[in-house]
Image (cartoon, rainbow, N blue to C red):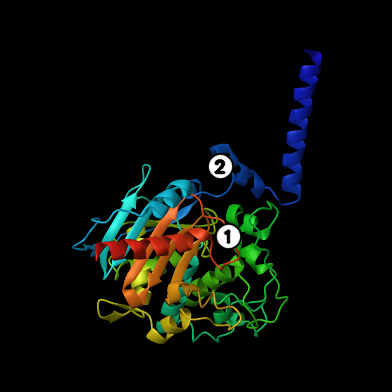
Amino acid sequence: MKYTKRFFKGLIFLLLLIVVLLYITDYNYILKGVRVVYMTGHTTAFIDDHTYFENESIPPSTKPQPWNHHKDYNIVDATSALLETNKELGTIAFLVIKNDSIWYENYAESYGRESQTNSFSMAKSITSALLGKAINDGYIKNLNQPVSDFYPKFDSSMKVGDLSSMASGLNWDESYTSPFSVTARSYYDDNLAETILNLEVVDTPGDRFKYLSGNTELLGMVIEKASGKKLATYLSEAFWEPMGFENEALWQVDDPENRLAKSYCCIASNARDFARFGKLYSNYGKWNEKQLIDSSFVAKSIVPRFKESPEYGYGFWLSDHLEKEIFVMRGILGQYVISIPEDELIIVRLGHQRGGRSGLPFTNDFYTYIDAVYEMLNAGS
């Protein structure tokens, strides 16, 4: 009994010492990570975690524009490969839009058409769309405007387009496993701007592609400073309202005081509304005959910037699977908006996990989703 008491006293002392050390060394955000992730039964960020953070609301459009149902809505069953993949990886929403109409949709567990789940890095594509809008609105001159015009601490060689195309040269560590990485700090800590402004340029900007979430966070800060508007407000005015989004969305912010949007991630919305960005870019920035973003900006966004990195443009991932020209909004754990304009096709997948990788630019599930949809379309024709 005496030894048991000593053990627990020692354990409590050790835990208190760890907490004190985390605060002293400015790693106390790890405590929030533990509380949000491990104490909720998870091992990493998860699609419902927005409820544990501060959020800005993006209200539904005052003139909602529901998707039409295709004449062949849900008449074709999912392939066995799709059913198996969806079950194994915990797909909670699978949506296929053909010719601007919902051709197939399916939801799992307790999720439905209006469920809000985390976009994760699909938000990077949306932030890049806001860059295009800010250029349209005259807040930003063009892709070649120096970031230093907005944040003088950075060298003038870094352009706003370098942030969107992942070519900034910043010393960001894109690690999803270390609790001490800047990625973890940005997700769980407060005062996100301070974290970003502590970054340094260590490689030549505009020289090559290197995927860094810090690029998009700094881009969001530039857009906010240039426009004088919070990102959630600007998103509402620029896209949510004119494109007839049916449901409220939430954009995570760093803390109750600063309320800086996590522009590199974390918009909570649903499959039907996420799909609207696929349609907007498939139509080169036009929505119902109104040009919301300049077509040349969209065209530049969905082709590679760097020949040696054909998998990325400006804010969008790219693929030539099945010899198609495909652009993709992509988030960790397998969040996808896959757009194939030549076939007037948009595929949205949301869920808990993603597949493994076999040396290709995307994880295996990405290819399964596309192959299965084409097999289903052929079966229905």
Q: Which amino acid does label 1 sit on?
A: Arg
Residue 270: image x %, image y %? 36, 56
Binning the other alpha carbons within 10 Å of mark 1 as few (below 14), some (14 to 19) or many (20 upward) gives few
Residue under circle 2? Answer: 42
* Marking on residue 357: 1
From the viewer's side, name the closer residue of 336 and 251.
Answer: 336
Numbered disc 1: secondary structure: loop
Give SS at disc 2.
loop
Q: In what quadrant of the picture does the C terminus appear? A: bottom left
Q: What amino acid does circle 2 point to?
A: His
Q: In which quarter of the image is the N terminus?
A: top right
User: In which image quadrant can residue 251 be found?
Assistant: bottom left
* Residue 154 picture location, percent across and down: 66, 78
Residue in view at x 41 percent, y 87 percent: 296
N-term mark: 2 or 1: 2
Label 2 crowd bin: few (<14), some (14–19), many (20+), radius 10 Å: few
